[in-house]
């Protein structure tokens, strides 16, 4: 089984590739290590989790990746025109969670484009899904393991999820308004601005603890809107932080919540930050992120002549160059985080601050469903009927597939 996690190497390695690239026959071997090409080419089936967060063009890119791995590793052209090279793909999703983030750039590239246009950014509007509907089988997993022990909470959340809730259901949710929970309960809010305000207030309450401030090492010209975290990272011992990388030693994953134990200053090298979770302590070092410029060029032989595929198309390959680098501790304060960053996590207790309103589809549902029971949820503001939003495109696809299967 080859498991392709959306935050892992596979999708991110090819996230730059759009389905309207000038030539899909890209020389993948200079981007994929041979063992990873072999894994994809030989896997009897592939599992992709959280596919509801993938944009339609990324699903089509994965289709290309699989086809090119089969061509390059097995020289197999038999199923070139079938989805995912006729390999069994298991997509796992909950479409009623937060939708893919759509930017103006995405719309310009994939909605207002004369060559290719998607009806929406959702995975089920990808060409791989739309053009091969007869090859796709769907089934609904109906057991709710997170709220398994609290059937009442599970029933309410199911109704909120599918937009079949009643005013009585909302009243039961709002009965959790300002309920007392432990002081270290994480706050889920709708915007980064509100999360930042809450985190600064909590940091200031750590009276008597030394304040450490870390500014990243950044190459000249690195765009400010691409900084992974705020410019000045300020922390203290006892601060609650979220780690923003997948540790190479597999001690933590992206978006894990930890507590800072101490900051140790070594005179011969950079400081080390000691963090703790479940009474186990680890050292976190600075992380380097590169912004890489990529372009596709023709493959030529020793005489400068183009190298062709059996179809007669010229072979191409990706070349890249590091433009900017960013070095900083991969963490941010996390007494409060946005609902978007909480989507895949389970918490012991949460306080939900909807601020003025929910501005995105499924924000209320995702926030309310982070705990094993609504008894562990406290609302800082009312949940209004208008806060419960379900994407109509998602609802339509869900009803169509569940009725069909």
Image (spheres, rainbow, N blue to C red):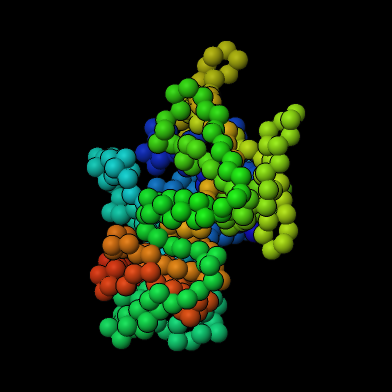
The answer to whether 345 appears left or right of 117 in the picture is: right
Residue ID at (75%, 28%): 268
Query: Relative to 386, is 203 above or below?
Result: above
Q: Residue furthest top?
A: 303
Residue 110 appears in view? no
Expressed as whole percent of the image width and height from the top left, the position of residue 32 reads 61, 39
Expressed as whole percent of the image width and height from the top left, the position of residue 295 reads 46, 27
Expressed as whole percent of the image width and height from the top left, the position of residue 212 reads 59, 41
Residue ID at (70%, 37%): 265
* Image quadrant in which you'd find residue 53: bottom left
Residue ID at (50%, 74%): 181
**Circle count:** 0
* Image quadrant in which you'd find residue 395: bottom left
Q: Nearer the viewer, residue 207 or 215?
A: 207
Residue ID at (68%, 33%): 270
Q: Which of the image's four quarters has the N terminus?
A: bottom right
Expressed as whole percent of the image width and height from the top left, the position of residue 286 reads 63, 38
Query: Relative to 220, is 346 above or below?
Result: below
Residue 183 appears in view? yes
Q: Nearer the viewer, residue 30 or 244?
A: 244
The answer to whether 248 appears left or right of 192 in the picture is: right
Query: Relative to 330, is 162 above or below?
Result: below
* Image quadrant in which you'd find residue 114: top left
Q: Which of the image's four quarters has the C terminus?
A: bottom left
Q: Nearer the viewer, residue 362 or 314?
A: 362
């Amino acid at each position: 089984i080859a498991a392709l996690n959306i935050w892992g190497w596979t999708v991110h390695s090819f996230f730059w590739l759009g389905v309207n690239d000038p030539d899909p026959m890209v020389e993948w071997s200079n981007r994929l290590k041979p063992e990873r090409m072999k894994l994809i080419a030989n896997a009897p089936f592939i599992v992709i989790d959280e596919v509801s967060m993938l944009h339609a063009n990324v699903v089509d890119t994965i289709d290309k990746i699989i086809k090119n791995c089969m061509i390059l590793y097995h020289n197999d052209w038999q199923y070139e025109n079938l989805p995912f090279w006729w390999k069994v793909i298991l997509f796992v999703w909950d479409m009623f969670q937060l939708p893919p983030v759509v930017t103006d750039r995405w719309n310009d590239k994939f909605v207002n484009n004369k060559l290719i246009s998607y009806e929406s950014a959702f995975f089920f509007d990808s060409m791989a899904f739309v053009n091969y509907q007869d090859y796709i089988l769907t089934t609904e997993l109906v057991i709710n393991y997170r709220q398994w022990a609290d059937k009442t909470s599970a029933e309410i959340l199911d109704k909120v999820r599918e937009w079949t809730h009643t005013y009585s259901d909302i009243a039961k949710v709002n009965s959790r308004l300002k309920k007392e929970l432990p002081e270290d309960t994480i706050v889920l809010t709708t915007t980064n601005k509100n999360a930042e305000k809450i985190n600064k207030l909590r940091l200031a309450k750590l009276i008597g603890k030394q304040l450490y401030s870390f500014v990243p090492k950044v190459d000249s010209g690195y765009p400010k809107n691409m900084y992974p975290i705020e410019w000045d990272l300020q922390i203290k011992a006892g601060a609650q932080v979220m780690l923003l990388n997948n540790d190479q030693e597999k001690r933590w994953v992206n978006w894990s919540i930890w507590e800072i134990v101490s900051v140790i200053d070594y005179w011969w090298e950079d400081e080390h930050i000691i963090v703790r979770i479940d009474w186990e302590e680890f050292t976190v070092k600075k992380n380097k992120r590169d912004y890489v410029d990529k372009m596709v060029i023709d493959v030529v032989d020793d005489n400068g002549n183009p190298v062709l595929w059996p179809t007669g198309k010229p072979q191409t390959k990706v070349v890249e160059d590091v433009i900017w680098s960013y070095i900083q501790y991969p963490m941010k304060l996390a007494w409060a985080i946005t609902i978007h960053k909480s989507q895949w996590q389970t918490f012991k207790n949460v306080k939900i601050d909807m601020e003025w309103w929910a501005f995105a589809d499924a924000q209320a549902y995702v926030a309310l469903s982070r705990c094993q029971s609504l008894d562990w949820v406290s609302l800082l503001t009312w949940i209004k009927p208008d806060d419960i939003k379900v994407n109509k495109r998602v609802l339509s696809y869900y009803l169509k597939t569940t009725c069909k299967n």
